[in-house]
Image (cartoon, coloured by chain):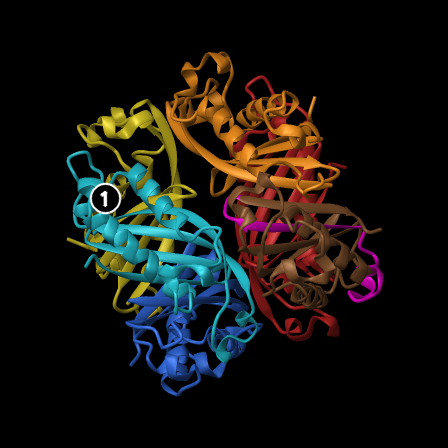
Chain colours: A orange, B red, C yellow, D brown, E cyan, F blue
Amino acid sequence: MFSLTVCDHIMIAHSFRGEEFGPAQRLHGATYAVEAEFRAPKLDHLNLLIDIGLAKTELRRILDSVDYHNLDDLPALAGQNTTTEYMAFHIFNLLSQACRHGALGDGGRAVAQIKVLLRESPVAWAAFEGPIA
Amino acid sequence: MFSLTVCDHIMIAHSFRGEEFGPAQRLHGATYAVEAEFRAPKLDHLNLLIDIGLAKTELRRILDSVDYHNLDDLPALAGQNTTTEYMAFHIFNLLSQACRHGALGDGGRAVAQIKVLLRESPVAWAAFEGPIA
Amino acid sequence: MFSLTVCDHIMIAHSFRGEEFGPAQRLHGATYAVEAEFRAPKLDHLNLLIDIGLAKTELRRILDSVDYHNLDDLPALAGQNTTTEYMAFHIFNLLSQACRHGALGDGGRAVAQIKVLLRESPVAWAAFEGPIA
Amino acid sequence: MFSLTVCDHIMIAHSFRGEEFGPAQRLHGATYAVEAEFRAPKLDHLNLLIDIGLAKTELRRILDSVDYHNLDDLPALAGQNTTTEYMAFHIFNLLSQACRHGALGDGGRAVAQIKVLLRESPVAWAAFEGPIA
Amino acid sequence: MFSLTVCDHIMIAHSFRGEEFGPAQRLHGATYAVEAEFRAPKLDHLNLLIDIGLAKTELRRILDSVDYHNLDDLPALAGQNTTTEYMAFHIFNLLSQACRHGALGDGGRAVAQIKVLLRESPVAWAAFEGPIA
Amino acid sequence: MFSLTVCDHIMIAHSFRGEEFGPAQRLHGATYAVEAEFRAPKLDHLNLLIDIGLAKTELRRILDSVDYHNLDDLPALAGQNTTTEYMAFHIFNLLSQACRHGALGDGGRAVAQIKVLLRESPVAWAAFEGPIA
């Protein structure tokens, strides 16, 4: 299996519901360093898994929907605790759609799996990975 | 599959038996940067894979059993060459037990797989991953 | 000159005043990875610059005053744009006071300079360094 | 599953054929930080997955065939666009051969899978992983 | 002293003249991860050292003059061995000019010193730092 | 001022004298990632600060005197608490001598300052820097 990973980051505010969260129930924030990994069993005739320029552009477009926002206020995330693991899943879904709908070109249509990993601090990160539905 | 990773580190002394180890047969030591990755197919009602506070506390409790020790002197490791790959397996087993016995809460009981990765230097690391037995 | 650096991190929300900030005028957040560097011209009789345990504890105590908060709401930061460079200066001042007042022991009293560096993302960071006033 | 990873790096020049590559059609270069991960279901009697010294030596020998070269001029890569994903596959193949042919000792013969990951910049990397054929 | 650092990277080809360079006399290449650090004794009325957006844009504009090129062919570098330390100096000069000429705004005119650091591999880097002439 | 930095690492065992050290009074160990920074006001006719090959070789030769050892047993360190800050100073002295005695060539003789930084864990490091005596 081949994989290609591109990185970017977002800076968001949010708060959590649930006593389990302790001080994280207060409005606080995070820089999420985002790693988007695309996997496919073969390369195209140019030896590319995916057009890296398209991948970066599309990841940025998706991240713009949450970057520099208070996640508590976003309709797309209403009713959700925006934990790191959930946000990885949220971005996974948007990237999967982008692949299916052709936003990442022919290479994107051939992507079999995606993994989205979000680093919230130097000592903690979360990810979601799965096949493109 | 979701995953959540927490990190910590230990500073240990040890020596190896076997000519294959060359100068590492002498008593020396290592900082192991430890990454404990918990995997589960779904999140709980709070969108958590596991309580990250419990995970850090339990990882620390487990690491305290080897941290700042000469591994050659520990009964729990008697007769073993404490290679990086073996130590990853050793910590994997202790974390698996902790999950099964409820030390990581309900989230811990729902963990399907664990990966423990130990970085011994900037250019070498080892890991063990597997289902919770 | 000797130096000793200890690290920690905080997760905060804030917003900026001023059109120059563009989308960062909205409420958003950041993980600041904090590096506190203590400098002194010599070591003590134990070959220590400073008690690293005290340094970590005191840095954590200082960071607790801003960690998991919306900086826009904190009286200690009222009227300030809490840019990364300003927050480095703010933490520098609190660490300097701690050294002068003995919270870091005799080693802390012998510290000549402090540098506080805050990483806001993988591609941007800011710092303040200076003599202990 | 156990894994052991060793790292090295190469500095190469190359150019790409295909309009999709934009400015990368010009002769340019890259530092590839190379991570070679060896996986096996069990350890040997010394608790080793593989002799790490042999692994480093063999990885270096393989990398010497491309290090400090213009990849456009190498017969072994003739007719190929030497993308990061392709170079990961190329090095994977050479490492697989080395394992099969005994260059990594008995441990190498027991390796089940290899993953080769090449970091081309702080924000992009590619990999190939698979069973040893 | 305050400082603000922004990062970017370039991918270049080049070769060196001089037997001291051994295999690096051949045409090869490098990814240079570039860290541009701006230093000033005080912040402006918005608590900014420099407009980080302008800094990133100007650094990118400067790097575009060498990115994806064979440095051996660039008139601006004719007759120079483009070692990492020399390239740090070259970029330092261009950033200094940009500050003096107002490309980084009023904040840029108040910058006292610049440090440019280029990482050529995980285990080697070079830098040039000095006052703005 | 120019600088060039090369990196390596050592894996050592040691123990500390003094109640201040708590559990670190026990025999334990550390991986020290070593960064050796050479500074000089100008480059030679090849645009080199120092021959990077000589620098790596000499750093390795110096590190071999402590690598894979129990520092408590080494005559060169007798009577010293081998703290990270002290070990940085110890390696600084050996590198300074090497520069003065010509082991790093003409470039080494022109080095004005050296900084040696030792990372003992992902969250703590120490350094010594000074002019070559």
Please determine whether, in this image, residue B122 is positioned above or below residue A118. Answer: below
Confirm whether residue D127 shows in the render.
Answer: yes
Question: On the image, which quarter does residue D126 sit in?
Answer: top right
Please determine whether, in this image, residue D121 is positioned above or below residue F37. Answer: above
> What kind of residue is marked 1?
Phe
Give the camera-side residue of C66 and F42.
F42
Query: In the shown orientation, is residue A5 left or right of residue A10?
Result: right
Q: How many marks?
A: 1
Q: Which residue is mark 1?
A: C89
Question: On the image, which quarter does residue C124 sit in?
Answer: top left
Where residue A132 appears, as percent x and y from the top left, is 69, 25
Tell me, yes or no, whether the highlighted magenta stretch contains residue D108: yes
Crowd class of label 1 (few under 14; some 14 to 19; many from 20; radius 10 Å): many
Question: Which secondary structure lies at badge 1?
Answer: helix
First to last magenta residue range? D100-123
* The N terminus of chain C: image quadrant: bottom left
Where residue A36 appears, as percent x and y from the top left, is 57, 35
Where residue E39 appears, as percent x and y from the top left, is 24, 51
Where residue E57 appears, as percent x and y from the top left, is 34, 40
Query: In the shown orientation, is residue B98 left or right of residue F40?
Result: right
Residue at the spot 17% in from the left edge and 41% down from the top edge: E106
Query: In the shown orientation, is residue D121 left or right of residue A13?
Result: right
Chain of the residue under label 1: C
Question: On the image, which quarter does residue F70 sit in?
Answer: bottom right
Confirm whether residue C51 shows in the render.
Answer: no
Give the camera-side residue of E53 and D4.
E53
